[in-house]
Image (tube, helix red, strand yellow):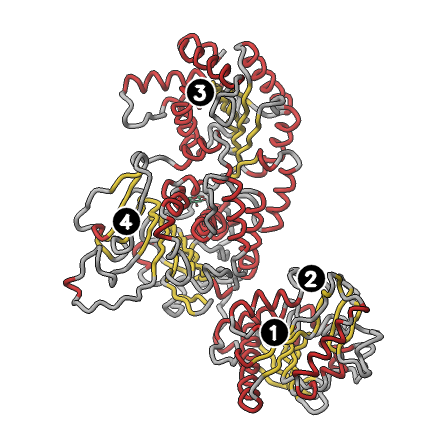
Amino acid sequence: MLAELYFTRHPGFWKMLTVAMCMALLGCLQAQEPQGHVSIILLGATGDLAKKYLWQGLFQLYLDEAGKGHSFSFHGAALTTTKQGQELLAKILESLSCPKDVAPGRCAELKAQFQRLSQYRQLKTTEDYLALSKDIEALVQKEGLREAGRVFYFSVPPFAYADIARSINSSCRPGPGAWLRVVLEKPFGHDYLSAQQLATELGSFFQEEEMYRVDHYLGKQAVAQILPFRDQNRKALDGLWNRHHVERVEIVMKETVDAEGRTSFYEEYGVIRDVLQNHLTEILSLVAMELPYNVSSSEAVLQHKLQAFQALRGLRKGSAVVGQYQAYSEQVRRELHKPPSFHSLTPTFAGILVHMDNLRWEGVPFILMSGKALDERVGYVRILFKNRAYCAQSEKHWVADQSQCLPQQVVFYIGHGELGSPAVLVSRNLFRPSLPSQSWKELEGRPGLRLFGRPLSDYYAYCPVREQDAYSILISHIFHGRKDSFITTENLLASWVFWTPLLDSLAHEVPRLYPGGAENGHLLDFEFSGSQLAFSQRQPEQLVPGPGSSPMPSDFQVLTAMYRESPLVSAWPEELIAKLASDIEATAVRAVRRFGQFHLALSGGSSPIVLFQQLAMGHYGFPWAHTHLWLVDERCVPLWDPESNFQGLQTHLLQHVRVPYYNVHPMPVHLHQRLCAEEDQGARAYADEISALVTNGSFDMVLLGMGTDGHTASLFPQSPTGLDGEQLVVLTESPSRPHQRMSLSLPLINRARKVAVLVMGRLKREITMLVSRVGHEPKKWPISGVLPASGQLVWYMDYEAFLG
Ligand code: BG6
């Protein structure tokens, strides 16, 4: 019916469609998809998002595409009754607007056409979906059309996803030869596990290529321009877009609004999940990814993006600062009916320092920042380049496009702020960029306007020829199947893998309170050193008492005592690791001074990772050039396997320090393409290497851990080898996977000059108690056999392991 109306009014259109279809049959058609009828079903058709953006985006799609041979029908759907829904939809459609260059008369005509093609229907039950499917088929058949595809846009809360997905899958899929695209809106989970569950559930109804997860920031014009800009300016950027030239990257989304009216959502998500995990991370990946040879290949873009995610260095609590605007808790109490004593810990502001572990970006700080109730609304990505020039002439003679002493920056200005529109800015002293002239034009001068410390005239500045809303752009990309503008399951999970540990570690963090707006002053300014981020101003008096008092510096005392008749150092984890790292450094410095080299044997597992990061971060005096690194034990997996202890060492330490490669001694667990085969004699080879390089086989320092069963290194209770005897290195069996291990033996460990045992976490509490009481019983508890013959043993335990 809808198409009938349309075609009787537009006989030319019908003719064109017929011609196009014939051409397709002849194989002459250039377009990727043969044309046909497209049905767009907007679920949640009368909700806020639909009202504000989606219908307007669909109207724009119709304006852009209808003349090119496709026919359309638009189905607004919701749970509301048909009558009520129709009324609401009619109002929404009435408020649609045309692009500025369309004359009012023409606009009215186009709107009327669109209104005729759009109808409301109640979609509740599977039968409703089946009926919709039948109606579409009937329409297509009646008009003698071919069905090209169906788009289902889920503008509904995620709890409704599964039921709708099931109904579409069972009862509303198009027939063979036509595509199905389902469009999903965030939140896509709350953390890694929930995101994975949701993805698995959706994956049981839809193929990956059918799902379009929206991040509307990918539709913002300045963001969508990042890759094309990098591509079109390859020549100028090739040498610049790397750690040698980039000083820092800032990815910022500031808002003046607060969360009032949305606290039920916000209380569960907070700023990191709401904005950083998605919008800002997506932008980061566009800036940081390796540029594919062909940027218009969705596949290549998505694959490079995923690689960028994989290069993100893990975040730690110290990588973040969080705040909360002062009125937030009161809003939550009011909206969620909480008692007067309730104080929320949800951050409404966050600044995060991100590093990437790859050759292009190593050492470059990426600062991500977002918050509600800030002093201005603005979004931008700013790439600030290092300035190495010295200008002999005085500043008054500096000229924007010549002076190398002026700041050099590229800015993708997402919108709002002083400029009030999207833009791409490039400092004139950098290079003259090339942008597609049909969509970007030079920005007119605005005397007096300063951006990022410089007058606008210092930049080559471009703005879109036609400003477009993000949703209109994304709807067009959905229609054209441009998957690179959407979030794949792999990318989504990779992002959650990155953010979840930080979110967990911040769960009980008390955010800094800020008054909101201009009054924030410098309260939220932050600064970084190494990979630590901190507010620049010390914690002021709390404006409103937080739910718990923040720990004071005096709480972080390092306690020294005795454990099993050896010295014990105990502290909170961060202080403990800092103390151990500085003890190792002091030992290294002493060893190098005395013997010219330092032999350090390191354990794997999770506790030492923080230590490795600490050593990599701040120990500039460490004599890495004279340090030999050995492994205490290894899992029988290839060295590149994430389970390999060497891989942990490589990722968290070796990549960041300069140990000569001939001083690095991984265990030979993978010889002749096999893992720990007896006949390959890997253990023997390692023992020989130790004997050849380490005087008397006596390591300067050995770092051990302690398992909950009392194992240490890969020496497990009742191990037939390694607890005594002559062998220096042995193959052993672990009760947990991977079972096969290689390990230094107790006799070799006990030859060390110094042995440190690091024990962390509540799970170790029981074994810590037990081992404190037992004597020398290595068969039962291998750790109890650690007693250097002439060296020193020191225990490093955090409070949870030691005190419970
Ligand atoms: C949304 C967040 O994704 O983005 C909101 O949920 C935020 O909290 C919004 O306000 C900002 O988008 P925009 O397009 O207004 O910058």
Q: Earlier in the sequence, mark 2 or mark 1?
A: 2
Q: What x and y, as percent, mark residue 69?
A: 45, 19
Dot in front, 3 or 1: 1
Q: Earlier in the sequence, mark 3 or mark 2?
A: 3
Task: Look at mark 3 in the image and give the residue it sits on.
Answer: 87
Q: Earlier in the sequence, mark 4 or mark 3?
A: 3
Task: Look at mark 2 in the image and give the residue it sits on.
Answer: 638
Marks 3 and 1 close (CB-CB < 8 Å): no
Residue behind label 4 places its C-beta within 8 angstroms of ligand 1: no
Query: Disc 4 to disc 2, how far (Cα)?
Result: 48 Å
In front of the other: 107 or 525: 107
Task: Look at mark 1 in the image and give the residue it sits on.
Answer: 664
Query: Disc 2 to disc 1, how far (Cα)?
Result: 16 Å
Query: Compared to 631, does 699 lie above or below?
Result: below
- Residue 453 occupies quadrant: bottom left
**Residue at position x 47%, y 67% from top?**
531
Task: Look at mark 4 in the image and give the residue it sits on.
Answer: 432
Taking 344 as reference, is 241 left or right? left
Query: Compared to 436, does 565 lie above or below?
Result: below
Amino acid type of disc 1?
Val
Query: Disc 3 to disc 1, how far (Cα)?
Result: 73 Å
Q: What x and y, as percent, mark residue 324?
A: 43, 57
Dot in front, 4 or 3: 4
Crowdedness near tag 4: few (<14), some (14–19) or many (≥20) residues, C-alpha within 10 Å: some
For the C terminus, the image quarter is bottom right
